[in-house]
Image: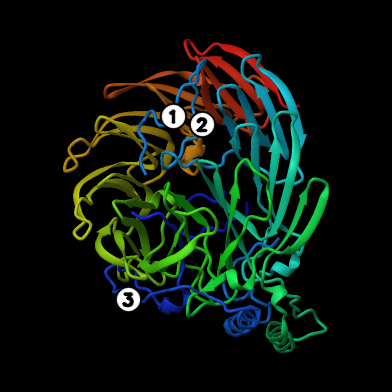
Amino acid sequence: MTRWSWGRRAAVFGGAALVVGVSAASAVPAVFDGRTDLPVENVPVELVAYDGCGAALDGLRTAAAPHVGVYGLGNKGYLFAEGDVQSADARQAAPTAEKEYSTTNVHEAGVDEPDLVKTDGTRVVTVVDGKLRVVDAASRKLTGTLDLPAGFASQLLVHGDRALVLAGSTMVLERGIVDPGFAPEQGSTITLVDLKEPKVIGSLTVDGSYLDARQIGDVVRVVVHSGPRLPWVYPDGTRSEAEALIRNREIAATAPIEAWLPKYELTEQGKKSTGTLVACERVSHPETHSGTSMLSVLTFDFPGDLGTGDAVSILADGDTVYATDKSLYVADDHHLVPNQNRPSGVTAVHQFDISQPGPPKHVASGQVAGSPLNQYSLSEHDGHLRIATTAFNAAGIPEQPPASQSAVSVLKKDGATLKEVGKIDGLGIGERIYSVRFVGPVGYVVTFRQTDPLYTLDLSDPTKPRKVGELKITGYSAYLHPAGDGKLIGVGQEANEQGRVQGTQVSLFDVSNPADPKKVAGHHLPGGYSEVEFDPHAFLSWKDLVVVPVVTYPSREKPVAAPSSGVLVLRLQGSTFSELGTVRQQSAADYDGVRRAFVVGDELWTASTAGLQVTKLDGLSQQAWIPFT
């Protein structure tokens, strides 16, 4: 999956509603001074569908014209690629008649998220290095391997005997010279697989970058992002910059509607079909937009036939997906202020109703100041949308108005507008958000620069959110996980007083009194780094165990000769951690790393690109090794 993330650490992937958060380019001031108390007008960003292809084409050409430059759309800062609450036991699925098993660590209960490994307690399905593999959990034998039509597949969802494999295009683009025309065949592929054999039932390739997907029951919604396919020209020695600019403007002004709308190629039952992914009448737009970016939401009945996804598209940008069983959010941090590499400072939010089968319907829009970190920055509770954001000043200069500070805004639907009804700001002045978690009416926000303030927020009155507690410690938590009984687990990095990180830190916070949060336990692994810091899918909480994949690098405390990887297994009892050990795979290369851990019955399974290993939970003795090569 191709992602560009500005203002993030990681550089890798009320009513029933779908909500899409995107940068409001028309509302972005030329200079944003970093204060989150600046008025962000609640100008409705209402979406309106085009009447037909003629109106769509006129609107797209007109909107895109101001953004066309010497390098097409590539010199305006737009980046394209062609082609709520769970307890510590929430990963535990309802037990089968035979064995209990853990499921993917997800943001909201009942809303599954794609990951590289899935299990139903009977079989284990993985997708790595372009291959899908099926393993029988009882015999611990590899029962099937399938080469996938898309080489970048790394995520899947499973329903009964079917799997939906998701793969996004990957392009390496130079900042400032970005053009979807460089790779006209790039796209994202959705593959439906029968796990019994296994075999491919159908494959759908669409223009653009796969962003993310969510599964609620037997419905899957997939979000992709695309840009127009236009044959830009460039200054190349035979053509000057002025000539390239004139020609590119002509290209944008005369391009047919087919150049703007994403295309698809569907292979099903041995037959191949192609066409336009979305009809012109199914494309919606705000009153003002750039005409350079499109989000499409595809809906699949799972595990039915694949089809083309019955797409609905909006002219917007975005890259972060969050969902409840009633809502889906895609929050934007792609957009940059023209000619400046910094966040725009405003995020627009579009809300769509998905309470009924079929495509979503737009119902309301709004906007907030600042940029969210990831999907955990958003939370829907009692009909309100809470969004934690960090805002930066124009140049990030400490001597100017605060270089950064963070806020939590509360929005509520009012007619066709998501209206801001409450806000708490001034969090982490000079810092930025490293993690967020909302637990019902309480919010937890971690900011960091040299020390780690953990803020506790009272959101019980949405119109008057307030900070009630603050804990300052060294290091930071990059992921927060509710542990029940007034406890919160944090996974991140320990750091010295100067803010220099010193290795993986698993912390336990007592937040039973929000006004007085306390760190009551911690486990430090010098030189350690965990994938949990940027991908919470890697985190496992199972009964009284906390399991975290780690890679350990040489450090002053542990001057090992080479990196080593495994999963750190901790037992949480009361307010203390005890280390049970680190499980390492017998044949996994250390640089590959153990990526995931999950439980089937009384066994701990670990997954890497090299294979699966089975370890006894009691004593951590190895039981089996299932190589992938």
Q: Position of residue 419 (x, y in %)?
A: 31, 68
How far apart are the alpha carbons under marks 1 and 3? 47 Å
Q: On the picture, is 98 further left or further right than 233?
A: left
In front here: 559 or 108?
Answer: 108
| Label ID, residue 179 | none
Q: Residue at x 28, y 47 (%)?
A: 443
Q: Residue at x 62, y 67 (%)?
A: 175
Estimate how packed mark 2 is, as few (under 14), some (14 to 19) or many (20 or more) residues with alpha carbons within 10 Å: many
Q: Residue at x 41, y 71 (%)?
A: 395
How far apart are the alpha carbons under marks 1 and 2? 9 Å
| Label ID, residue 41 | 3
Task: Assess whether mark 2 and mark 1 are in contact (beta carbons under 8 angstroms).
Answer: yes
How far apart are the alpha carbons under marks 2 and 3? 45 Å
Q: Quadrant of residue 77?
A: bottom right
User: Which residue matches tag 2?
Assistant: 550
Give the residue type at disc 3: Glu
Q: On the picture, is 383 further left or further right than 160?
A: left
Q: Quadrant of the C terminus?
A: top right
